[in-house]
Image: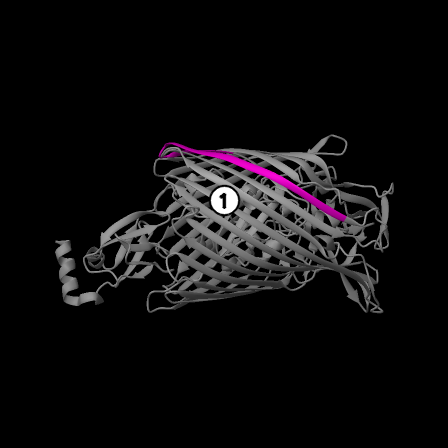
């Protein structure tokens, strides 16, 4: 009867009836975007937009149509039935999510169930809902990545006990790490605009086989918005967003627009953010309060009493991000894309340095980073085809420019020192995939070239006299990496597959030292070294509801210009000098985990890992021709250098839980426990600096139709004085004080609530109340306290 009615409706009203379909998730009525819609022989196809809508006019009246989505069960239905249902189609979620696709592990799309490494996926809807101010905040929202901050304009991720240049960042497949990425905390990740990120993935643990040097603790991959082709009348689409936060008076505006036709697509994006000084919470350690700060009165440095000690002065800054992409797809075989990214900040204060004290007084009158600028030009060619050597091929050529500067002046002193670094980075990647029946071979090559420019000067703030000063890095130095890699996915059966991989990397470093300021016993550094890494992993699914994963892998980090040639004050009273004798450090890792689906309502995801770091590059006391001290910026300082002087061990547990009470209500919880030890000069061991305390989050999420509500808590464990690394104990100004007068990192928690309402197909409103109980806390190793009670409101318009 239904079929007859459908046929009569179509016969009477013709193609004007139900030519538009809305695809919704069954049980929640959420519109599903990026649903592929095609006929059986795939001669006609389309996809849904951001509101779950698609035009079916290209399909014939009695045609059988297939609806396919990455996280939902496939649906087959006739066009006549779509018409009879009023143009609404419901798809059932795939509860196990085992068919999720990941892009990062082999540089090509793979089903997540076939990947032995643990990966964390951040989808577009997660980004929109979490409303992160920076990409560091985006990673932190997963509950699986710990983030340290030295200032508001910062965010240094920690993964499995590693941080900074032992983690790798990529943007659209291009390596962001460069020759001056340091071992201390890094804030380069804030150059990536979270509102221009389409999705992100984190590989937990070593990934040097595919990504080379630095990928010891993990890889963070960001995939930005993609231009969308159009086969319909509507060729222009986009989004406008505005957001305000009370804790730092954030004012953010974002706009992106896409123009697409059949073979060409253009996408533009812009984001501007203005952050004021950050207010901390009311309930917590008094040591975090900002009682006073340095200022200038009548040309003299003075200490100013802060009328609101919860306000962290100064911390505010501004940032702008631009993105432009062009895509050309002449046919189903070739795909060309060109991307240009630009990010810049205003000056931003190094807040942790600005509340350092010496002899009871503020040490610095000024300490700020100059504008952090980053440009990436990226050209990619992708080709499909069945050939002898490959089925898929991808070429990626990229150029990046980095600029950063440091500006510091001691309290009461006339001389301000400024160092400025500029870096050009070129890279080429060739990646291939070849299928053999059920098995796949991946292989490729990579070349990276970095040139470093560095200079410094001193300026008398009273007389404006300017003079040269020793640069942070050897000016004109270079760093090169050449590599080949291969990996093989062997699908032994429907329930068992294995991965094997190997990579050889050659590293060349050249640096010439300027000895007019310091009489070093060497004039240059020439490093020509190689590294061989490998991996083997297994996935076993003894039942449809259980997956076991195990992985053995090695990784390395080669010395870069920051390790070999840096001159800087590492801590009060110490200065780091160059060391041209460095060699690569190696990591050996084993991890084991499982995913267990119990019935239709419970999923448990757990894994454990153990990593050994050998020949670790660490900062230790050093001698230059028998001398242990050196004069630096007018002060006698202890000499230190980066040296291959230690081994380290790190191990931990990662657990996840999902309970689905109904299609609309679910509970999600994540927890990570990490512990690590580092070998000291005397042979003893001490806690590893970047092994974070226990951390995690728990979310209770209710979603139905146009409404999504999330009540959640974030929490961190405690680090007693004995748990702190020696280098952290020396930074007592970062921490609270225990009953014995020793620094320690207290445990903390927050209670938060977020709600999102889809006003109509164009307008969406999101509001959050974070840290409802107004806790005053400072995440481990951070130099700035986190936001107190914070109300966030965002309004977006899609067209």
Does 531 appear above or below 394?
above
Q: Nearer the viewer, residue 493 or 597?
A: 493
Task: Report if residue 542 lies within the magenta region.
Answer: yes
Outermost front residue: 388
Does 462 appear above or below 356?
below
Query: Which picture quadrant has residue 420?
Result: bottom right
Residue 53, x across and y down, in percent: 32, 60
Q: Is residue 447 left or right of residue 7?
A: right
Judging from the image, the colouring scheme is one colour
Does 678 appear above or below 665?
above
Q: Is residue 145 left or right of residue 39?
A: right
Q: Is residue 690 visible?
A: no
Q: Secondary structure at mark 1?
A: strand
Crowd band around label 1 with a 10 angstrom C-alpha radius: few (<14), some (14–19), many (20+): many
- Dominant SS of magenta comes to strand
* Label 1 sits on residue: 443
Task: Report if residue 633 lies within the magenta region.
Answer: no
């Amino acid at each position: 009867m239904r079929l007859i009615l459908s046929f009569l409706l179509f016969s009477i009203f013709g193609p004007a009836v139900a030519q538009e379909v809305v695809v919704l998730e069954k049980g929640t009525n959420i519109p599903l975007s990026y649903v592929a819609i095609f006929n059986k022989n795939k001669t006609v196809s389309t996809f849904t937009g951001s509101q779950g809508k698609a035009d079916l006019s290209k399909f014939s009246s009695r045609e059988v149509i297939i609806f396919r989505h990455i996280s939902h069960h496939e649906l087959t239905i006739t066009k006549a039935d779509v018409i009879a249902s009023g143009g609404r189609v419901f798809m059932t979620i795939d509860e196990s999510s085992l068919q999720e696709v990941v892009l990062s592990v082999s540089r090509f799309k793979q089903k997540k169930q076939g990947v032995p490494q643990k990966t964390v996926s951040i989808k577009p809807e997660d980004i929109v809902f979490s409303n992160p101010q920076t990409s560091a905040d985006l990673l932190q929202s997963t509950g699986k990545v710990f983030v340290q901050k030295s200032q508001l304009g910062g965010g240094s991720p920690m993964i499995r006990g590693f941080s900074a240049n032992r983690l790798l960042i990529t943007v659209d497949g291009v390596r962001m790490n460069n020759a001056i990425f340091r071992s201390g905390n890094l804030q380069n990740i804030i150059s990536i605009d979270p509102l221009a990120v389409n999705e992100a993935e984190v590989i937990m643990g070593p990934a040097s086989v595919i990504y080379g040097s630095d990928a010891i603790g993990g890889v963070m991959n960001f995939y930005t918005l993609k231009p969308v082709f159009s086969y319909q009348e509507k060729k222009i689409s986009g989004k406008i967003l505005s957001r305000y936060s009370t804790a730092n008076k954030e004012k953010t505006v974002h706009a992106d627009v896409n123009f697409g036709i059949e073979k060409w697509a253009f996408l533009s994006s812009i984001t501007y953010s203005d952050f004021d000084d950050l207010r901390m919470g009311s309930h917590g350690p008094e040591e975090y309060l900002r009682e006073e700060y340095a200022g200038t009165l009548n040309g003299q440095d003075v200490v100013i009493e802060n009328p609101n000690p919860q306000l962290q002065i100064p911390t505010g800054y501004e940032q702008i991000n631009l993105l432009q992409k062009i895509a050309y797809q002449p046919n189903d075989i070739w795909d060309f894309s060109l991307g240009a990214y630009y990010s810049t900040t205003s000056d931003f204060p190094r807040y942790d340095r600005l509340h350092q004290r010496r002899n009871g007084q503020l040490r610095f009158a000024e300490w700020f980073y100059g504008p952090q600028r980053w440009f990436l030009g990226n050209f990619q060619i992708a080709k499909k085809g069945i050939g002898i050597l490959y089925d898929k091929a991808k070429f990626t050529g990229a150029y990046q420019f980095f600029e950063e500067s440091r500006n510091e002046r001691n309290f009461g002193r006339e001389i301000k020192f400024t160092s400025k670094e500029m870096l050009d980075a070129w890279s080429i990647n060739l990646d291939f995939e070849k299928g053999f029946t059920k098995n796949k071979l991946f292989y490729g090559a990579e070349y990276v070239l970095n040139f470093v420019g560095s200079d410094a000067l001193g300026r008398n703030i009273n007389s404006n006299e300017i003079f040269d000063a020793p640069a942070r890095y050897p000016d004109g130095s270079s760093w090169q990496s050449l590599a080949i890699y291969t990996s093989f996915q062997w699908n032994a059966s429907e329930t068992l597959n294995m991965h094997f991989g190997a990579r050889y990397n050659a590293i060349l470093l050249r640096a010439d030292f300027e000895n007019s300021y310091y009489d070093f016993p060497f004039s240059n550094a020439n490093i020509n070294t190689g590294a061989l890494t490998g991996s083997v992993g297994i996935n076993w699914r003894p039942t449809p509801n259980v997956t076991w994963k195990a992985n053995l892998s090695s990784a390395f980090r080669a010395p870069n210009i920051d390790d070999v040639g840096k001159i800087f004050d590492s801590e009060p009273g110490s200065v780091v000098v160059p060391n041209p004798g460095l060699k690569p450090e190696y990591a050996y890792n084993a991890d084991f985990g499982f995913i267990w689906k119990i019935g239709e309502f419970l999923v448990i995801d757990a894994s454990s890992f153990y990593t050994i770091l050998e020949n670790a590059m660490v900062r230790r006391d050093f001698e230059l021709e028998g001398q242990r001290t050196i004069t630096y910026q007018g002060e006698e300082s202890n000499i230190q250098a980066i040296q291959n002087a230690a081994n380290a061990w790190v191990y931990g547990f990662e657990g996840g839980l999902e309970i689905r009470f109904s299609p609309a209500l679910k509970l999600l919880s994540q927890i990570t426990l990490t512990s690590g030890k580092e070998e000291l000069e005397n042979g003893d061991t001490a806690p590893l600096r970047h092994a974070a305390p226990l951390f995690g989050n728990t979310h209770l999420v209710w979603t139905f139709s146009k409404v999504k509500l999330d009540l959640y808590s974030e929490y961190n464990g405690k680090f007693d004085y004995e748990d702190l690394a020696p280098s952290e104990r020396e930074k007592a100004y970062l921490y609270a004080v225990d009953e014995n007068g020793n620094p320690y990192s207290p445990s903390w928690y927050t209670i938060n609530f977020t709600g999102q309402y889809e006003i109509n197909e164009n307008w969406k409103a999101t509001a959050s109340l974070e840290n409802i109980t107004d806790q005053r806390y400072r995440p481990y190793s951070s130099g700035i306290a986190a936001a107190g009670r914070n109300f966030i409101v965002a309004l977006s318009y899609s067209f």
